[in-house]
Image (cartoon, coloured by chain):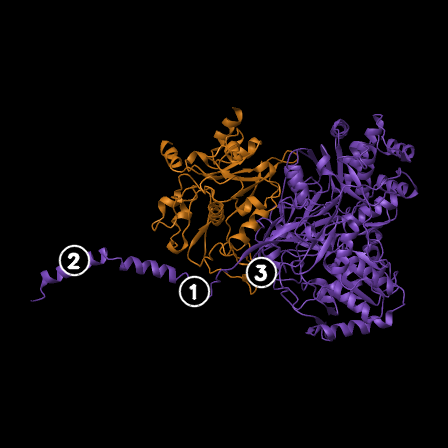
Amino acid sequence: MAFNRRGFLKFVAGGAVGTALTPLPWKLIDDVSIWTQNWPWIPRIPDGNVESKPSLVKLGATEYGILITTVDGQPITAAGNPNHPLSLGGIDPLTAASVQLLHSPARVSRPLHKEAGGGFRPLSWSKATDILVDKLAPLQGRQGSVACINGDETSSAHEIISALLGEMHSASAQYFMPSEAGTQQAVWQNLLGGQGSLGYDLEGADLILCINADIFGSWGTAIRNQKVISQGQAACLYAGPARNSTAAIADEWVPVLPEKGAHLALSLASLLLQSGWRPKEPVQGLAELSDFLQREYSSKAIPKKTGLSLATVKSLAERLTRAERPLVMAGSLSGLGGDPIILFAGLVLNALLGRVNANGGLRCIPTPPKVLGRAGSVLDTAKNDLCSFVSDLARGKAHKPDLLLVYEANPMYALPNSETTGAALASIPFKISFSQFMDETAAECDLILPAPYFLERLDDSFTPFGSGSANYSMAEPVARPNADVRPTPDFLLDIMGRLGLQTEVGSYEELLTAKANLLGANTRQLLQGSAWQDGTTARQPPLRLWNASIEECLNRLASGATHQMPLSLAVESELKTGTARTAIPPFGLSTLREEELDHNGFAVRLNSQTASELGLQAEDMVELISSTGKCSARLLLDESVIPGTVVVPSGFGHTHWDEYSRGKGDSVFKILDPRFEPGCGRTMWSDTRVKIAKI
Amino acid sequence: MSETMQIHSEFEIRWGMVIDIDKCTGCAACVVACQAENNIPPTPEPFDRLRTVYWIMVYELSNGKPFPHADRAYLPRPCMQCGNPTCATVCPVVATTKDEEGGIVSQIYPRCIGCRYCMAACPYHARVFNWHDPVWPEGLDKTLTPFVSVRPRGVVEKCTFCHHRFQQAKEKARAQGLNPNHLAEDAYIPACAEACPTGAIVFGDLNNPRHRVSKLAKSPNAFRILERIGTEPQVYYHSTRDWVRLQADNSLQREKEKVKQS
């Protein structure tokens, strides 16, 4: 049969019909699409046993119980723990991103020793132990020769560090990183004569007035704060310089310059007293305080002091007096201490309102028990002022320790005036960092002894700052260590043994079990994710509202200061950009909007009126200059910032860590201007002023 | 509109969200929870839009007024799971459909040919295209979840209301001898709603009167974005602030003024 034209057309037509009717081409297209999406370099998802395990987040911000989902023991995601009183099922962005930090490229995978050239050389734990013992042995008995900066004020590791320093005759040389808890403790006990530590009983309040404190952002128990207040049982008012997380959902925002928050609290106190309001509970020095307030915060003076109309302040005062259970939460904008005056003013206002040890008010939480007899009280350590110590060190006025231990802290990055204070710390001859990450401080240390990440270790937390009552949480590891790490408390116990110092417990686990027993807590239940709670309050003798120190504080505040710089600095601390201890996590970086961070750097926010007065426009590259340093940024105009203030987010400007945080923006800590406030006995930097220049 | 109603009536269950904008602090816990749960790769360059993938974004809204009358709000935006999904009608390979009980708009990655018609059609910018293969730095890939496959370059992806959680909830219900088509409230919640610390994101069956969302969606202060184009989103928002509700539609300026006056 000849293959003619007709035959050819038949063949083509038959082929086309046959191809269309067979599944082959469709199957091939489908397979091709699958094959082209299964390249070997695309990660494969795991397959295994999925479990949920309780843990306790410890990243330098609020601590609470969480649930970690694991696949064959490998943590993959974090979620809030509904059974934990400080989570109530909620979670913050940093904690939600915490599992990925377990595998951060910045993890220190083994002990490292700094070489003469500045690089690090890996070494074994036994060798590292020998080095540390050799360094510590000659320092025994030499007072103040060893110091420690501790970034974890709720953990029982404090007791072991305290016992070690005590045995080394350096008992008072443990310092917590600057925090709201430490500053409040100093004010509460030293100025007001308060007992124990302070809690905020949000659950019982019907009106909450926040002054500067960003209670939904990073201040206190931020997740519990959000969970409780979003239930709508209490009205929430926010007074502060910008619409931050708290102002975003508060019932009302009252714009106040950062440095005028304390004036607002004292103005409210003055109006209360003027209206004949007297506290139900006895207080000391009320007459003197009343005289001072009448003199300095008269109705005529209040608008000038606060920048608000008298009617606005009166309205706030009336709302406080009309409420059955008002609660004032005043604190620093950053939630990192630095404003003892506003803490004091807030406590005074609460005291006048009769809210101390009251339902829905402030609660005097008894001093936590300690297991080690040789350890100091955690509340006493909280009163030690690290900033003063470092400042004195920089000026040669403090005794320089021979050896510095840094535990769970990154002071080279997060201390105010970080460049100068960092240099002061760098001058200490031998420094040891117990960091999980190659942070700014670890990079400057002589020895890095990596501690387990919080998901890899047994640890505890006693009553994080801002809690409503005493609580205790504990968590065991949910993951095998991802690096050659050793739990720092156990390591320090070994060191004490090697030095022949007395150790009262054999292990950290033994200490935590003993602490749980002291509290009457069930260890098994704690490890299952619940928390021990105790609503007992410490008996509070009449608070001192007036003494020489308070007078000095208030006179200095009332006299005001003449400013060389035109702008107030408002530090904004959001957990998606990390904490003073933890850098921006990989998933945290992804949450930043383009206006917050771009190729040109991070954004600082200024009101358009202020920008116009300064000759600036949106998107200008600017330099913020304080008396301590400079910080460069991109300018964003924001009408929800009070005129005369520049809002600068924290968490940017890391020089170490990993590619997710290193070189992203600039650090606000460089421009914080710390000064010692003698009345309060504490360093403050909340009144930092800056000028701004176009680059 | 009658066609829209017909589409809704096809489903006995209609999963939906009501997001209370007045409760949102813009913290972005929802964004992080979504990324971790759904194997979205982290990027060290978040401002490089060719390398960033989002299933939920938090937009910042402003009322545009000067200080002190300026107001700000945050709007989390997942996929709206539209009742009339414009993305599904343009997809040439049926990679995205709305054909499963529950009304979740699917995205079938192996079928996707990367034409991005769906992206052009989506009025909510809820879809993203993988211009590059996903990259997890060494070690970070250990945190991949077993719930969602990793998407390669060349395909479009979007929020699925954590569809795997829906499947898990149904399996759990079957194992317990319960009806998987009548899940209890909170038996199935996407990762973003679970993470939200203020409870701003409420999730449930819009057709089930026992679920909170069915009541919240009927609130006079509830609204949907671009409602008048008829996509019938299953994501509702809630705000008592007029200016927030007005921004939900890209009305002409004069129309807004008319609404304000009324």
In whole angstroms, how far apart are the C-alphas of marks 2 and 3? 60 Å
Judged from the image, the secondary structure of the residue bearing numbered disc 3 is loop
| Whether residue B33 is situated above or below residue A330 in the rendered picture | below
**Which numbered tag is attached to residue A39?**
1
**Colour chain A is painted in:** purple
Host chain of mark 1: A
Q: Earlier in the sequence, mark 3 or mark 1?
A: 1
Please, which residue is most extreme toward the top here? B262
Mark 2 vs mark 3, foreground winner is 3
- Which SS class for mark 1? loop
User: Is circle 3 on the same chain as circle 1?
Assistant: yes
The structure residue drawn at horizontal position 90% and vertical position 40%, both measured from the top left corner, is A551
Q: Give the mark, 2 or 3, whose residue is nearer the N terminus.
A: 2
- In terms of depth relative to the viewer, which is nearer, A482 or A210? A482
Subunit that carries the residue with mark 2: A
Residue type pointed to by label 3: Gly
Q: Amino acid at mark 1?
A: Trp
Measure the C-alpha gap from mark 1 to mark 2: 38 Å
Label 2 amino acid? Answer: Ala
Colour used to depict chain B in the structure image = orange
Read off the residue under disc 3.
A73
Q: Residues within 10 Å of mark 1 (few under 14, many from 20)?
A: few
Residue holding disc 2: A13
